[in-house]
Amino acid sequence: EQDQKLQEFLNPKPYLTVDTLLTPLKKEIYVANVAKNGFFKNMDLVKLKDGASYTLNLTQQQIEALEPSVYLRSWRIKSSVKKTNIVLRALKDLPVKKAITQLHFMEKKVARELVEMLERGVKDAEKMNYNPDDLYISESWVHTDGHWLKRVDCKGRGRAGVFTFKWVSVRFLLKTSQTTKRLAHLAAERDANKKVFCAVSKGKIRGNAPGFYRW
């Protein structure tokens, strides 16, 4: 704990992507757009404090990167991908505090490690002035962490097997209601632009004349 460089490496300081990825003018336009709509809306005309009006066009990846989010990653966890994935699928789209409560009552061993991760995410959100009650689990995934240990499994009659000690690593991506509002807006736009199904074609009622006789 007294090694400052080690603590900075283990617990990096959280930062806002809006401050690092955008120029001052684009940041001002982005913030005004979010304040107007509740989320970022592409090519929406906004008026700044100096009276000038601007529009901003961003790609899908840029919008997702700029939205308020908390990225969490774990160290090596003694479990398997199959066992951990069962727990992660139960936490999909849950509010963070509700997910922590659910994990406290789970009998899975990996739930303890996931509780520590999500509690760390709540602390990071408070450091970035995010509302912890507004966070939800947007994405979560697990992958194998290499260098599995193997030991001899001695059996009867001179036979032997292999014990494999598996380790995994977990990732969480927490987002806010700004993302849910944007996704709801995109879903409403898709429904509005969807072509209405009509069983009757635009052709003549008698249909097109075939190129052969019917008698």
Image (tube, rainbow, N blue to C red):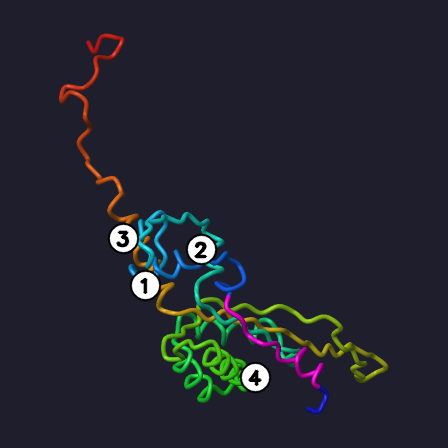
**Residue 63, quarter of the rendered image:** bottom left
Say what amino acid the circle numbered 3 marks: Ala
Residue 71 in the image, given as x and y percentages of width and height = 53, 71
Q: Looking at the image, which residue is at 21% across and 16% down?
A: 208
Residue 99 sits above or below residue 174 on the image: below
Quick one: label 4 or label 1, which is nearer the N terminus? 1
Mark 1 highlights which residue?
Answer: 35
Quick one: label 3 or label 1, which is nearer the N terminus? 1
In the rendered structure, the answer to whether residue 82 lies left or right of residue 54 reads right
Q: In 3D space, how far apart are the residues under numbered discs 3 and 2 (Cα atoms)?
A: 30 Å
In the rendered structure, the answer to whether residue 132 lies left or right of residue 158 reads left
Quick one: label 2 or label 4, which is nearer the N terminus? 2
C-beta proximity under 8 Å, tags 4 and 1: no
Name of the residue lying farthest toward the right: 158
Instruction: Please tell me how crowded label 2 is: few (under 14), some (14-19), or many (20+) other residues with Cα within 10 Å.
Output: few
Q: Looking at the image, which residue is at 53% across and 71% down?
A: 15
